[in-house]
Image (spheres, coloured by chain):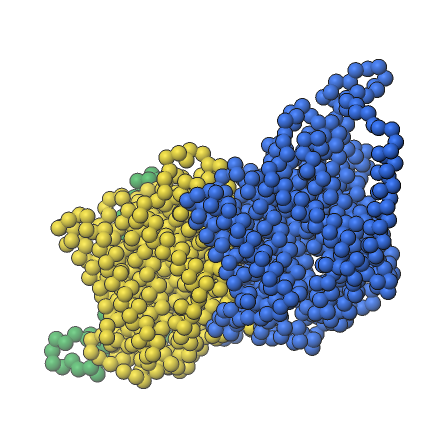
Chain colours: A green, B blue, C yellow
Amino acid sequence: MSLIYNWMYYIASGGLILIGMYIILVKTNLIKIIIGLNFIDTGVNILLVCIGYVKGRTAPIFSTSRINPTNVVDPVPQALVLTAIVIGVAVLALALSIAIKVYEHNKTLNVTKIRGLKW
Amino acid sequence: MQLITILVVSFLGAGIVYLTGKFSGRVRDISAVLVSLAVVILVGLAYNQKIYTNFYSLPFLNLSLSLRLNYLSWFFAIIVAGIGFLSILFSLEYIKDYQGVGFYYFMMLFVNAGMLGIVLSADFLSFYIFWEMMSWGTYLLISYKGGKAVAAGLKYIIMSVAGSLAMLFAIVSLYASYGTLKFSSLASLLQIASPGYILFLLLMFVVGFGVKNAIWTLHTWLPDAHAEAVSPFSAVLTGVLVRMGMYGFLLIMYSIVGLSLLHKLGYGLLNFNYILCWIGAITIVIPTFTALLQNDSKRLLAWHGIGQGGYMVLGIGVATSLGIAGGILHTLNYAVCGALLFFVVGAIEHRTGGVRDLNELGGLIKRMPVTFIAGLAGISGLIGVPLTNSFVSKWMIYKTLIMENYPFLAFAAFIGTWGTILSVYKFLHNIFLGQLPEKYKDVKEVPLTMQIPMILLSLAIILFGILPGIPLKVISGIEKSFGVEPLSTTMFGMPKEIGELNLINILAVLLVAGIVVYLIFSLSAKSRRVNQDDNYAAGLFVPRGKYQYSARFYDQAYRIIGPYLHDVVDDFYYWLVGKSKSSFQIVRQIYTGNINTYALYILLFLTLLIFVKLGWGL
Amino acid sequence: MVNPSLLIGLPLAFAFSIPLFGLISKKIEKYIPIIALFINMVISFMLIPQILKKPIVVSIGGWSPPFCINLVVGPLGILLATLISGIGFLVSIYAVSYIKEEPTEKYHILFLLLMVGAIGIVLTGDIFNLFVFFEILCISSYALVAYYKDKEGTEAAMKYLIQGSVGSSFILIGVALLYGFFGTLNMADIASRITSANPTYLFITLAFLITGFGIEAAIFPLNAWLPDAHSSAPSSISAILSGIAIKTGVYGVARMVYTIFNANSILLFIAFLGLLTLLIGEMCAFRQDDIKRLLAYSSIGQIGLIIFALGIATSLGVFASLFQIVSHALAKALLFLAAGYMIYRVGSKSIASLNGLGKKMPLTSFAFTIGSFSLIGLPPFAGFVSKLSIVYAAMQVKKPVFLAFIAIALIATIIEAGYFFKIVQNLYFKEGKNLDKITESSGYILIPIAILAILIIVIGVHPQFITGLLKASARELLERAGYIGWVLGGT
């Protein structure tokens, strides 16, 4: 029980990444695949935050004077995650706009039918 | 004098000719002739010197490129320069109506320069660089004519690249084992190598040079390439370019590996030299008889080129002093005869508008007498009539085969000559003798610049036939540099101990016989001129057009030997290419176009990487 | 004493100033990338002699490594930065007259951002910074592939985006795991402490990183996006993608394997992967009808050769691999630029439609011939020297399996020769149809093509111009203690 409790967030992030990969492998609707990409991004972000977690410490925000560097969690991954979230949003926006154009040209979002370029 | 000047003059000359061609056609033609003549003179001046220079260094690979001149390189260099010059002289009139003439002259001079670089190089890296430059230059020039020549050029370059890459494999292996690529150092370093390694090297080099020299299984590019290229370049191809393979054989077998080491390769009868002799023998017999069946004059000559190359390989395979000398001399002789015959065909093409089909031509002796005499000289040279140059070289090869007790090989050599006689007679007869078709009534003799190369080469055939001592002196020098006992020669032949050939006797006999026959002819009753169509036909009137009895010469022979002489090697190569193309089509379908499949590939790669490597050990 | 961070900062500033210049006049926008990349090229050339003496380490923010983000400008970095700036400069000259479809200023902004991303990847010394610049490169290229907004472009961009995103996520997983093991993001710091972690977990991290960078580097099963993307993008972007973007992927793999992880046991597997990529790339290229797709598959093949050379873990092997990177970048950029303009003139992408163009567009066809001969590896062009170095480096490893590898690589060269020679013949010696209205390319198009052709010949005839820099870069990759010393032990 305590094993799951200790590893809960890692299992969650791994699970999200696996769900995301499953969606990309199996689903044939383009929008669903893009959502799958987003799942993977979210999973990786949770992984990053988890790595920075130290047991029993609190958030690294200088709000009161009782915060000193020995009782906050590692702040570096939090900064990395901020960057990664922004990158994920940008990719999502670009992907959705390209999906709109693909729909305009092919009149379908089924990935198995959008196969003009092959071999 | 510097060796590098020869190369610089050749390469820069090519570039300058191309640039002047942009301004004026006549200046370009004259400068092309001058450049090639200058090269001939420079090479001639370098006779009897031994020079060695380093001209370029590649420090990051610890290599330097160098050039050298000894008897072997001088011999081949003078052939290259001479035939190159005569070809350019010939093409002044021939190439006038083609498109892109500047490109043609540039490429001819470039290929010439490449070949000079090959024979002058002293280490394998510069050899390989010039070899490749010559190859791609040749490819561009074969395809120059357009139409069917394009496919011929592609076939040539693919086979040539395959050969060159085999050579590259051997060269880099040499470099990795010994750290140097200079011929002189390698000659001494290879003496202590294991026979297996030397056999591997020789095999790779034989593949590389064999593609160029067209030995039996690697010959399939040659008929198409010779037949479809423009005639002056076909002359260069057959005379010198193919013989670059011959130079390579001599270089690797005798200059570098050396005679003593060659004898150690193999057990009893199954040694390297004997197998090479057999390959040469097959190369003589099969192509010479395939030439019988050809109806296209250039294809016929191309198949002969392969056959005569077999004589050269046979000669140097029998590793005696007489045999090696015979092989090398035959290179010179065939260069002269083969180039001459291609010039003759080029002259016919020029005047009849590109006709090469032997069944259409005939009777041109009356309209083009100089070409006929050149053709006759070339034919006699090819067969080996006494007093022509090939007689000397073929005599040496026959004699050494008999002296060394190789009856089957000698038999193959004799059959080759018999086949040569049959097929070149067809060539001469169908073009020049017989009835003149109506449409060729007005052809004229070719212009002077085209006649001069033909006349010069015919004179060379007779000259080297009567005075074989001139080339044989150089060849003795070559043999001495190989460590083989050199042939002792006199101006007119060889003394009794070696091969007993004394041409002054033969010349005397033939002259006396000729004078007697001429006296009888001139003193007896005069001959009467008759119209050629005035023939007895049992009362029937045969119209003139149906009189072309030399068409489909050897028809019976087609029916008997035709099925046996189908080119199975060519079919094999086409089958191989076809199978590869269909397998490539299958490989293409990995990229199916479905994004789910692509994501699956990514995931499979990741899992494969993790599990395989973990199982294998880090 | 120029600060190398200008190499990244200047194009970035110019990129965001393009709309401002656009307010003054619409015509100036086309010339801004030329100015920015020219200044970049000049700065990198000026830095080369200094870096060959002692590499520069720039610490951002005034803190000392390993706590800050730093740029490590060693010989490898400056070599790739010069190559990127040079090719970018030439392609931006080409793009002045090639890009006519609106909105052109977005093209130039995205192009400069792509350059920033590429130069940032090769110059940085911090793994998360590497990831950020890698994302900048990837996102700009997704948008640029879809630039024409036609059916093929959007489909190719969509497939590229999905695969590229998966790759970037894998890289981020790798970065996260590395941070979890070592607590630092600085490459030199991780490199010096690499032996202190469990090898199995480290290997899983390396697998994620190789897969992620391998998608951009076009290693065998991961490169399915490449033919689509390179053939549907505008030709100047195809040249940049083939010439620069996939090389940064190779740089990523090399940095991970050699400097950070020091994973010598995986190098044989990488060499084998490279060979597989080479063979399959050349085989697929042989039967293409579309010239840009053929050139894209040929790029896959050449990257396979580069990765094969990288897997030969000797200094000559890495030297040969870097030389092949330079010669392939020059030749492939030349081929895409020339082919792109020929396609634009003729109006169709099939190879059969290029027949007979040698007479109408002689200089462009001549440049195309030079590029293809260099790729096959014929003297006297640059490709010959690099292929010779690769074969020689492979032959020096005295294991018999490498002899088989060399034989397979030479067979792939024969296949490559087959299709390139056929195209060259089609250009010059076959008759074309409907070619009356075609004239030679204009000045803006010809200048970069001519400069690239001249560079190929010059490097082929006299490779000593770049071999000093290449040897120093190879030494940097192989001697990781030197790299660690520059960052941690020095300034």
Residue B8, horizontal then vertical, whole percent: 50, 60
Residue B142 appears in view? yes
User: Which residue is most to the bottom?
Assistant: C489
Residue B246, horizontal then vertical, whole percent: 68, 58
Residue C447, horizontal then vertical, whole percent: 33, 52
Residue B263, relative to residue B371: is it above or below? below
Residue C128 appears in view? no
For image coordinates 63% across by 64% down, the residue present is B47
Q: Quadrant of residue B3?
A: bottom right
Apparent side of residue B288 relative to residue C236 in the rendered image (left or right): right
For image coordinates 29% across by 60% down, the residue present is C115
Q: Quadrant of residue B207?
A: bottom right
Apparent side of residue B143 relative to residue B527 in the rendered image (left or right): left
For image coordinates 79% across by 54% down, the residue present is B392
For image coordinates 65% across by 76% down, the residue present is B189
Residue B214, relative to residue C458: is it above or below? above
- Quadrant in which the N terminus of chain C is drawn: bottom left
